[in-house]
Image (tube, rainbow, N blue to C red):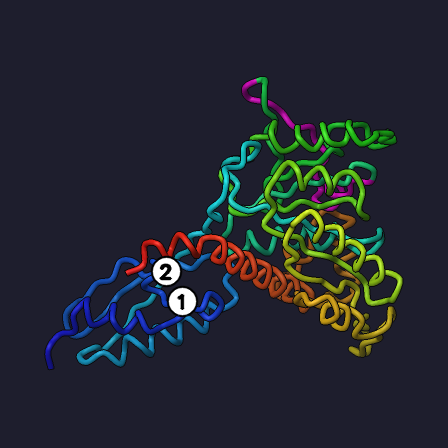
Amino acid sequence: MSQPTEQQVMEALSKVNDPELHRDLVSLDMVKDLRIEPEGKVSLRVDLTTPACPMKDRIREDVEAAVRAVPGVKEVNLTFGAQVRRAQREAETLIPQVKHVILVGAGKGGVGKSTVALNLAVALQQEGAKVGLLDTDFYGPSVPLMTGLDQKPTSKDGRTLEPLEAHGLKVMSIGFLVDPDQAMVWRGPMLHSAVTQLLRDVNWGALDYLVLDLPPGTGDVPLSLSQLVKASGIVLVSTPQDVALADVVKAKTMFDRVSIPILGLVENMSSFACPHCSGTTSIFSEGGGRKAAEAMGIPLLGEIPLDLAIRVGGDKGVPVTVEHPDSAQARAFREMARKVAGRISVETHQVRLPIFQMGAR
């Protein structure tokens, strides 16, 4: 039997679609380093649109099946890379090397928004992305405690601050710059100026994702951010009870008004898993997040359990995704992170689509 050719393999791959983008891998320029080796061995790399791709296993199966169906192919050696793509839009002047800004917000306090933001950032980093975490909750910054960082940022050039690092993340918070016992009595213009400086005057470097932990509610900081950066989307966090869900609906309305895409809803403290009997109890009602997401027409990104390990990790500065990476809680955060990354890839593709089409064959 004759050797397969590159043209035959590429033709086969042109019939394999990215399950979320609904276009073939060839026209998306995801097929790299294709080599036809002796005895029918085919080697190639597929560059995903994010290292946290939720459809990686599906793509692997489809690619291997398509290539093996080419006459003469005996073996397929498939590897994966990732190239996070920036949406085709005006350049960000404050953070030009950051490809995507992810906001994490909530309609009210006390729903675990900072816990979700931190573990989302860590999970994305664990998948292979370059990630930063910015705490913009000026009145109640919790990221310093939750990351275990207590030192002051330094400057190498006298103009920009170097972010601190924890758990593979670049981290910045107003809590690093002020006395922890000092109350922040700031009005809107001061908050706007502080947000600007934490974006512009921090040496974030090249990042795939910068996760911003917002203050609760719909006040000055979210409005300032809508003016300062082109966020790729916001993750809304709520607990299952009605009062929290009512507030998250209001938050969605505000972000809709300022044209920030809603990536989806995370139901935090979804249920309590007893460490002794392994039973689960829905302390804050049941199914509220799913119903609210359906009513708002947005995806439910995850249901995060209420668990002692999450609280303990947050208090001692080691998130559960780091300390207990194989736990059900960590798996829930990683699944959420993959869904967020997938949603951003879809949003980015939709923005870039007209440009792709202009160059399509």
Mark 1: which amino acid? Arg
Relative to 343, say whether 8 is above or below.
below
Q: Inspect the magenta stretch and tell me whether residue 322 lies in it.
A: no
**183 on left or right of 60:** right
* Residue at numbered disc 2: 28
**Pointers 1 and 2 in contact (CB under 8 A)?**
yes
Among the two numbered marks 1 and 2 on one chain, the one whose residue lies closer to the N terminus:
1
* Quadrant of image for the C terminus: bottom left
The residue that appears at 30% across and 69% down in the rendered structure is: 14
Judge the density around disc 2: few (<14), some (14-19), many (≥20) Cα neighbours within 10 Å. Answer: some
**Residue 343's disc number:** none
* Residue at numbered disc 1: 23
Residue 36 lies, in percent from the top left, at 18, 66
The boundaries of the magenta stretch are 140-157
Residue 311 lies, in percent from the top left, at 79, 56
Relative to 51, say whether 315 is above or below.
above
The residue that appears at 87% across and 31% down in the rendered structure is: 183
Which secondary structure type mostly characterizes the magenta part of the structure? loop
